[in-house]
Image (cartoon, helix red, strand yellow):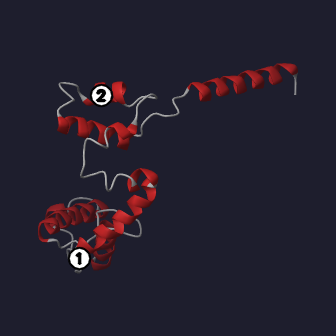
Amino acid sequence: MTIQSKMLCAIALSGFAALAVSAPAQALTSQECSAKYQAAKKDGSLGTMKWNDFRKAQCGADATPAAAAPAAPAPTAAAPAAPAEPKQAKKEAAPAAAPTLPAGPAIYPNAIDPKYAKETPGKGRLHTCVDQYNANKTTNGNGGMKWIQKGGGYYSECNKKLKGAA
């Protein structure tokens, strides 16, 4: 390494260190800030302040996340578990929501809709599946599937069925 490259490396490293030191370490997360904003909105202390102004004023490095918790007595029972392990709380919430979805079989179209006959086969299948998916939403006929999801959503299964029917 030349002296010039060593100097450049040292400058870059010191610049990174300065940036790391100057970054706000105690800023609230967006979820904490949102909870604080909603609490302020409920108790009327928000006034005419908008979200961006509130976020800049209340959610910076010197903000305290606990200030909003006492204002809302009902969420305090759930609040201690959520900030401690937010990723685990999301994982626990997902299985709890899963049983409420309909477990029945999904309803798929039998063939590409004639109004999409002039489109390419792929686009015809896509539009036919979209129409059926949206129609199924009102009758809970999607079998609990989302349009696209890991492991194959409604579109993936519908597309397979229509490819086989053609």
Q: Which mark is residue 54?
A: 2
- Residue in the picture at 30% in, 71% down: 98
**For residue 106, which numbered disc appears in the image?**
1
Residue depicted at 28% across the width and 59% down the height: 123
Mark 2, other Cα within 10 Å: few <14 / some 14–19 / many ≥20: some
Whether residue 149 is visible: no
Point out residue 14 in the picture as x, y percentages from the top left corner: 71, 23
The spot of residue 148 in percent (x, y) is 33, 62
- Of the 4 image quadrants, the one containing the N terminus is top right
38 and 15: which one is in front? 38
Front residue of 143/62: it is 62
Residue for point 41% across, 65% down? 150
Q: Are marks 2 and 1 in contact (CB under 8 Å)?
A: no
**Position of residue 93 measured from the top left corner of the image (x, y, whole percent):** 34, 63
The C terminus: image quadrant: bottom left
Horizontal relation, residue 41 to residue 6: left or right? left
Figure check: 46 above or below 152: above
Q: Nearer the viewer, mark 2 or mark 1?
A: 2
Looking at numbered disc 2 in the image, what kind of residue is underneath it? Phe
Horizontally, is 48 left or right of 37 in the view?
left
C-alpha separation, residue under disc 2 versus residue under disc 1: 45 Å
Along the viewing direction, whichever of 139 and 37 lies nearer the viewer:
37
Label 1 amino acid? Ala
Q: Residues within 10 Å of mark 1 (few under 14, many from 20)?
A: some
Residue 130 shows in the view: yes
Where on the picture, by quarter, is residue 10? Answer: top right
Is residue 120 left or right of 60 when viewed as pictured? left
